[in-house]
Image: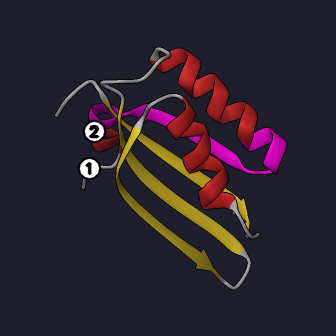
Amino acid sequence: MSESRVVVTVIGPDRIGIVADVATLLARQNANILDINQKVMGGDIFAMTMLTDMKMTTVDFAELKRLLEEKGAELGLKIHAQHEDIFKFMHRI
């Protein structure tokens, strides 16, 4: 596990362009998407999880988290970011 890896989760009403909008925000901060999983549940609920690498980002974690949350509010989605180790600890079986 690396502190530079961040899990980004997105949930909300499905619409065209969600992946592009979130990926664009991450790219502008120089965050690298390592893995992505997205699904539309029940025909209208969008859910996505991304594993990102922040080694080369232009902002710190707190600022990236704030930017993602603002983008979520703008798009009517919940976007949350947390360090990979915290995510794994919270979701262990």
Categorize mark 2 by other alpha carbons within 10 Å: few (<14), some (14-19), many (20+). Answer: few
Mark 2 secondary-structure assignment: helix
Q: In this figure, which colouring scheme has been used for the structure? A: secondary structure
Look at mark 2 in the image and give the residue it sits on. Answer: 89
Q: Magenta stretch: residue 76 in it?
A: yes
The residue wearing badge 1 is 92
* Mark sitting on residue 61: none
Quadrant of the frame with the N terminus:
top left
At 28% from the left edge and 38% from the top edge, which residue is drawn?
Answer: 89
- On screen, residue 45 versus residue 1, left or right, reads right
Please state the horizontal and vertical placement of residue 29, each as a whole percent of the image: 52, 28
The location of residue 57, given as percent across then percent down, is: 42, 23
- What's the distance in space between the residues labelled 1 and 2, CA to CA? 6 Å
Vertical placement of residue 58 versus 29, above or below: above
As for residue 85 lying within the magenta part, the answer is: yes
Who's the residue at 53% across and 74% down the image? 39
Magenta stretch?
72-86
